[in-house]
Amino acid sequence: MGCFGSSKKSSKRSDKNRKDTAKIRKTLGGTSDQTQPCSDSTKVSPYRDVDKEGVVVKEEDQLALDVKGLNLDDQPTGKKAQTFTFEELKVATGNFRSDCFLGEGGFGKVFKGTLEKLDQVVAIKQLDRNGAQGIREFAVEVLTLSLADHPNLVKLIGFCAEGDQRLLVYEYMPQGSLEDHLHDLPYGKKPLDWSTRMKIAAGAARGLEYLHDRMKPPVIYRDLKCSNILLGEDYQPKLSDFGLAKVGPSGDNTHVSTRVMGTYGYCAPDYAMTGQLTFKSDIYSFGVVLLELITGRKAIDSTKERKDQNLVGWARPLFKDRRNFPKMVDPLLQGQYPVRGLYQALAIAAMCVQEQPNMRPVVSDVVLALNFLASSKYDPNSPSSSSRRRNASLHRDRDDEEKRPDLLKETESEVSS
Ligand SMILES: Nc1ncnc2c1ncn2[C@@H]1O[C@H](COP(=O)(O)OP(=O)(O)OP(=O)(O)O)[C@@H](O)[C@H]1O
Ligand SMILES: [Mg+2]
């Protein structure tokens, strides 16, 4: 990892770290403490910046300030985000040819391209010029990803800010997003098996742990959802899209006051109601993703009966009795899951989506529990691990019992009580 890590480095390095911390606080800290309801249109439009005299700063000027202020030429890791000309990115994508098109989100279109000078395949997000992603979000994305370095966070290779064009250049993730593998699978596409789902959950949790516990200053992601979990060749997950990231509360503060942004269905109810953002808001969103992985259902599904449209609303009553658990699992798994693993995974999800933020676990406990589940061997062809053995959850060998992370012990009693 290591943007800020090494204690061996000189005091110059610590100064640099302090400067980085100040810089990231300034850009990710934001200024608004307005509160507005969580919108269905996913992202609330960005506000325009106002300078000390109350004059609206032109977005162009603000971009120049923010991006220049990033000092990207001087990254502590030596892995600076590069700047590209629009022409270079045009050439890389064959002038944004339709057969290079990878997908489209709320902020613009994503294209696959090849950068000749780096001889590298990349994904290029061209922000919609009239769209919702503003200057601040662009700068926050560039800054966060330039300072971060973790195998479960997508790498930003560079960006282009030329005229009114804003483009972000990422490492290419060959398996697309988790959403592409969970929902509305095209005919013939193989659904993810249980072990892969647990590996994805554990990897995504490690990415979140890096943001919460290892970045300095710590960062709240605010946009955790299946479409922002991208998958590598071997389904290694990486979190992407950091435009909404915020520096976490410092000192004795328990929360950051901010306008409510995020995606409907993933947004923690406490944050949606009060605008008070905490690390536990991300834990709630993580719980929703974990539920999607287990159940194969969408966070919001308007094709379902009204009472079942919200995944957490559907799951909460079922959490009360573990006899419901086998009914909750994704039918596409065709019964191929370990019963005990299912119980444990659902128990973790139930803890994460609790109404009260202080009842939700911290990310490091989630990581321990999911690493344990992801490393538990499950062979669907072995009769001993078959889901047909419904009483498997009662069988525990002593070694296994001792190794189990505390959260798993806690959640099991929690959910069954
Ligand atoms: N680095 C990447 N490598 C490969 N495919 C990518 C990459 N980044 C994005 N994509 C593809 O482009 C799609 C659109 O991504 P984008 O982040 O613009 O939108 P989204 O996540 O679906 O929605 P939102 O705008 O709310 O974040 C993704 O679902 C994914 O399939
Ligand atoms: Mg996205």
Image (tube, helix red, strand yellow):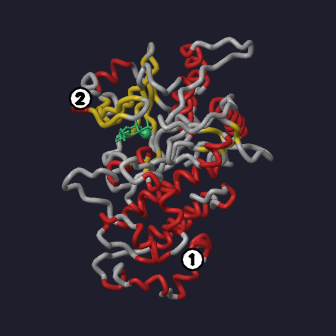
Total marks in image: 2
**Under 8 Å from ligand 1: the CB of mark 1?**
no
* Residue situated in front as seen by the camera: 112 or 410: 410
Residue 179 image point, x, y percent: 37, 49
Q: Nearer the viewer, residue 82 or 159?
A: 159
User: On the rendered image, what quadrant is the C terminus found in?
Assistant: bottom right
Q: Residue 330, percent across and down? A: 36, 64
Q: Is residue 309 above or below residue 246?
A: below
* In the displayed structure image, the side of residue 9 where residue 195 appears, left or right: left
Q: Is residue 289 above or below residue 174?
A: below
Residue 229 tag number? none
Q: Residues within 10 Å of mark 2 (few under 14, many from 20)?
A: few
In what quadrant does ligand 1 lie?
top left
Is residue 97 visible in the rendered image? The answer is: yes
What residue sits 41% from the left and 52% below the top?
Answer: 298
User: Does the image show residue 216?
Assistant: no
The residue lying at 59 percent from left, 63 percent from top is 351
- Residue in the foreground of this view, choosing between 318 and 287: 318
State the image coordinates of residue 382 (x, y, percent, origin top left): 30, 82
SS at badge 1: helix
Q: Which residue is mark 1?
A: 416
Tell me the element at label 2: helix
The amino acid at mark 1 is Ser
Identify the residue under disc 2: 98
Residue 7 in percent (x, y) is at 68, 48
Cα–Cα gap, marks 2 and 1:
52 Å
